[in-house]
Amino acid sequence: QVRLVESGGGLVQAGGSLRLSCAASGSFSSINFMGWYRQAPDKERELVAVSTSGGVTNYADSVKGRFTVSRDNAKNTVSLQMNILKPEDTAVYYCYANIVTTYTGNYWGQGTQVTVSS
C-alpha cells in the first residue's frame, strides 16, 4: 500500500521560514508528479507547488519567489522550503503524488498545519 508521510509545519511569525518534507513508501514503479497543495479554512484545496520527476516545477503565483519545491527521486521524497511567510499562507498543507503501481493514481498525505501569525 502506498503511503505519503509528511513532517514539518507548525507556528511561525510573519516573515519567518518553515520547511515541509514528505516521503513516499510502499510498492510502486515510479512517481510522476510530486508536490504540495494547501487548504485554508472555508476555501478549496489549491496547488502550491509541484515537481515532475525531471525537476520541472510549477508554482502558484502567490508563492513564487518565496517557496521552493525540491525532490529526491532516489529517496522518493519532496520538500517545500517556505520563506517570507505571510498570514495568508496559513493552511493545512498536503503532500501530493501521482504514483504508478498497477495503475496510475493520485495519493495524498494526512496534512500538516502551517500557521503564520502577524
Image (spheres, grey):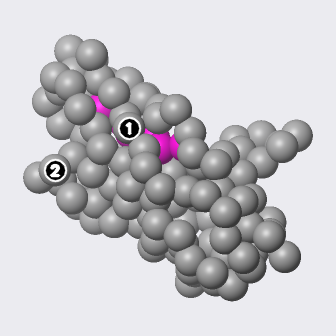
Residue found 72% across the figure and 76% down from its top: 13
Quarter of the rendering containing residue 44: top right
Residue found 16% across the figure and 23% down from its top: 27
**Residue 97 is inside the magenta segment:** yes
Residue found 84% across the figure and 76% down from its top: 118
Label 1, label 2: how far apart the Cα atoms are: 13 Å
Rendered location of residue 66, percent (x, y): 58, 80
Report the disc number at residue 45: none
Decide: is 41 above or below 14. Answer: above
Q: Which residue is mark 1?
A: 5
Quadrant location of the N terminus in the rendered image: top left
Residue found 63% across the figure and 81% down from its top: 16
In this view of the protein, which residue sits in the foreground, 33 or 25? 25
Question: Callout 1: helix, strand or loop?
Answer: strand
Decide: is 100 above or below 90. Answer: above
Boundaries of the magenta span = 94-99
Identity of the amino acid at label 2?
A: Lys
Rendered location of residue 70, percent (x, y): 34, 66
Residue neighbourhood size for the residue with mark 2, other residues' Cα within 10 Å, grouped as few (<14), some (14–19), many (≥20):
few
Q: Which residue is mark 2?
A: 75
Rendered location of residue 48, percent (x, y): 58, 58
